[in-house]
Image: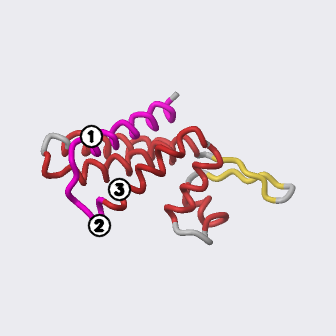
Amino acid sequence: MAESKSLEHAGHNEKVCKYLDRKPAFLDWVITTAFYSAMHYLEHKLFPLKMKNGKREIKMKNFEEYYMLYGKDDGRHKAFSKLVEREHPDISDDYNKLKDISWTARYHKYQYNRTISNHAKTMLDNIKTDCLK
């Protein structure tokens, strides 16, 4: 159930990203929606997740369950980044770069040029491709 919701949410955010990409005034939101779409594609790929807890194996259905057990020392985004780095290091660079430019777009600088928003969409495409294979 959580898998399909993550995939559905990823697709929704990606549609918003493509819609906003038509207007150069909203490139900051193109970047932001690309990031959140990537995050949901990764959640789809990561969960359910089995991890050892001592001698016992625990199966977590979604990130919320993981965060309650293993991520509470970090904020949610940092805990998610660490999980991606550990489980899927091949796409963690794209994810972390996308997270960083999204953070900047949301809180520090909202005016971006097309080159940067195109790069964000490329990183999203890389993540999506990896997550759906």
Which three-letter amino acid code belongs to the residue tagged 1?
A: Lys
Which three-letter amino acid code belongs to the residue tagged 3?
A: Ser
Q: Is residue 30 left or right of residue 26?
A: right
Tag 2 secondary structure: loop
Residue 16's image quarter?
A: top left
Which comes sooner in the sequence, label 3 or label 2? Answer: 3
Q: How many marks?
A: 3
Q: Are marks 3 and 1 in contact (CB under 8 Å)?
A: no
Q: Residue at x 58, y 44 (%)?
A: 46
Q: Which residue is mark 2?
A: 108
Q: CA distance from mark 3 to mark 2?
A: 10 Å
| Tag of residue 102 | 3
Q: Is residue 74 left or right of residue 118?
A: right
Front residue of this view, candidates 63 and 116: 116
Q: Which residue is mark 1?
A: 15
Prevalent SS, magenta region: helix
Report the span colored magenta.
Answer: 105-132
